[in-house]
């Protein structure tokens, strides 16, 4: 697995690179946003560790640009503690965030957890699951709705699969966090809300009035099967 580490603090990058290589990962590095985008585009990257504050192009701009051509998992690194910065990172397409200062073991644990989720065991070509108007293509990990192909991130696919396989079952935000992110995930339930909103924007004709992924007010979310 190849990981791209992006931060303008060269000593920090050196330390992260050393520890990730000890875990068996191949590591490439970038020290500004523009270099990060070029590497993400030209290299076969499996995960990006991306600092928020970067020269030439900040982390959010990098995340948004990369999302234009790749669904590679992105973990944001931020020295800021304000919740708005973390949520913005998720809305721009990041999969997770870690606040500085951090323990390198936390970083490696998050990386391993995300890579396990986005690289499931191989499935047979053409394997699909159909629920009403929506079908899941396991070979390409995408959805098809009424003949329209919907490209999904790894987390969006996992959430949609869970909903489709359990129609009508209401999941609390805590349930979804535990199931989709893992019991050891240290994030909070707002992560779920951001991903549900992004998923609705892709699969719903009108995200403001969702047809498939409904809200059970005061409880959580569920899938409505016609």
Image (spheres, rainbow, N blue to C red):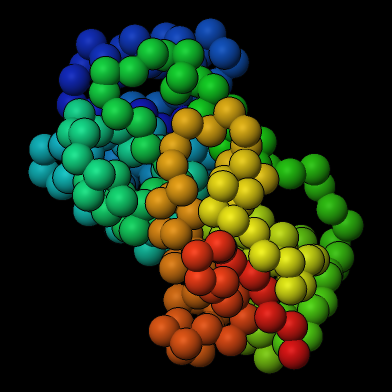
Q: Nearer the viewer, residue 12 or 86?
A: 86
* Quarter occupied by residue 53: top left
Q: Is residue 10 in view? A: yes
User: Which residue is depicted at the point 80% across and 43% down?
Assistant: 121
Farthest left residue in view: 56
Where residue 55 sits in the image (x, y, percent)?
11, 38
Where residue 146 sits in the image (x, y, percent)?
68, 91
User: Which residue is depicted at the point 15% across and 47% down?
Assistant: 57
Q: Is residue 151 left or right of residue 168?
A: left
In this rendering, the answer to whether 161 lies above or below 14 is: below
Figure quadrant of the N terminus: top right
User: Which residue is depicted at the point 54% across and 53% down?
Assistant: 173
In this rendering, the answer to whether 58 lies above or below 10 is: below
Where residue 158 sits in the image (x, y, percent)?
66, 56
Q: Is residue 134 left or right of residue 55?
A: right
Q: Is residue 180 in view? A: no
Where residue 19 sits in the image (x, y, percent)?
45, 10
In this rendering, the answer to whether 187 lies above or below 16 is: below
Count how many numbered circles sit on residues in the image.
0
In this rendering, the answer to whether 71 lies above or below 1 is: below
Figure quadrant of the C terminus: bottom right
Q: Nearer the viewer, residue 129 or 224?
A: 224
User: Which residue is depicted at the point 18% across and 34% down?
Assistant: 80
Q: Nearer the viewer, residue 41 or 171?
A: 171
Q: Is residue 19 left or right of residue 77?
A: right
């Amino acid at each position: 697995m190849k990981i791209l580490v992006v931060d303008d603090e060269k000593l920090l990058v050196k330390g992260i690179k050393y520890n990730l290589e000890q875990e068996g990962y191949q590591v490439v590095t970038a020290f500004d946003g523009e270099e990060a985008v070029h590497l993400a585009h030209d290299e076969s990257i499996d995960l990006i560790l991306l600092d928020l504050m970067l020269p030439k192009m900040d982390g959010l701009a990098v995340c948004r640009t990369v999302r234009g051509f790749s669904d590679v998992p992105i973990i944001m690194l931020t020295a800021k503690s304000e919740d708005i910065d973390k949520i913005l990172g998720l809305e721009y397409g990041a999969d997770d965030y870690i606040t500085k200062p951090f323990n390198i073991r936390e970083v490696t644990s998050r990386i391993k957890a995300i890579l396990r989720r986005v690289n499931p065991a191989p499935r047979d070509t053409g394997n699909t699951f159909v629920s009403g108007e929506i079908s899941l293509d396991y070979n390409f990990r995408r959805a098809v709705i009424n003949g329209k192909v919907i490209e999904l991130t790894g987390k969006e696919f996992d959430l949609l699969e869970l909903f489709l396989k359990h129609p009508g079952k209401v999941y609390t935000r805590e349930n979804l966090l535990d199931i989709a992110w893992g019991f050891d995930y240290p994030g909070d339930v707002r992560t779920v809300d951001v991903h549900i909103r992004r998923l609705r924007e892709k699969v719903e004709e009108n995200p403001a009035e969702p047809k498939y992924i409904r809200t059970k007010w005061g409880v959580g979310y569920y899938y409505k099967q016609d």
